[in-house]
Amino acid sequence: MSHGKEVLDGLRDETAALRAMIPDVYDGFAQTHKAALRDGVLDVKTKELIAFAISVSKQCDGCIASHARGAARAGASPEEAAEAIGVALLMNGGPATVYGPRAFAAFSEFHGQFARLRTTSPS
């Protein structure tokens, strides 16, 4: 099982249905998401790695997949992702030993995808 794209794809229909029922709530969350993850004193990559580590602690497969994709898209390396998971292990203990490997698998999936895009895109 993929812990990245398949998780996000599996949530798509249910999310769309709920979003149709409560669009204002989802729009508010989208605005918060955009504001929290824009470049500031901390860059997007750092913020995505923080969200990625929190996702492991929260044991949220959808969050893990989303922020694994975000961190990979922002240029995080596998080593940076692994260290972020290490901090989640410190703060969350045993459950993070289950969700950490899932998170690293999701990150690796997206990292490969975005690495290919960076090597094939004209500079």
Image (tube, rainbow, N blue to C red):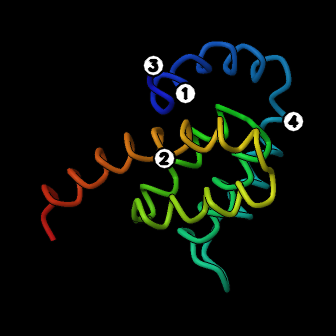
Which is in the foreground here, disc 3 or disc 4? 3
Nearer to me, 32 or 98: 98
- Give the structural element (helix, strand or loop) at label 3: loop
Check the image and report above or below for 13 versus 92.
Answer: above
Which is in the foreground here, disc 3 or disc 1? 3
Residue tagged 2: 69
Nearer to me, 74 or 96: 96
Mark closest to the chain's N terminus, 1 or 2 = 1
The residue sitting at the bottom extreme is 41
Q: State the quadrant of the N terminus.
A: top left
Amino acid beneath label 4: Val
Check the image and report above or below for 80 versus 60.
Answer: below
**Picture disc at residue 25:** 4
Q: Residues within 10 Å of mark 1 (few under 14, many from 20)?
A: some
Amino acid beneath label 1: Leu
Q: Residues within 10 Å of mark 2 (few under 14, many from 20)?
A: many
Residue tagged 1: 8
Q: Position of residue 101 (x, y in %)?
A: 54, 40
Q: At 87% across and 35% down in the image, what residue appears?
A: 25
**For residue 42, which quarter of the picture?**
bottom right
Query: How far is disc 2 from disc 4 in space, using C-alphas?
Result: 23 Å
Residue tagged 3: 1
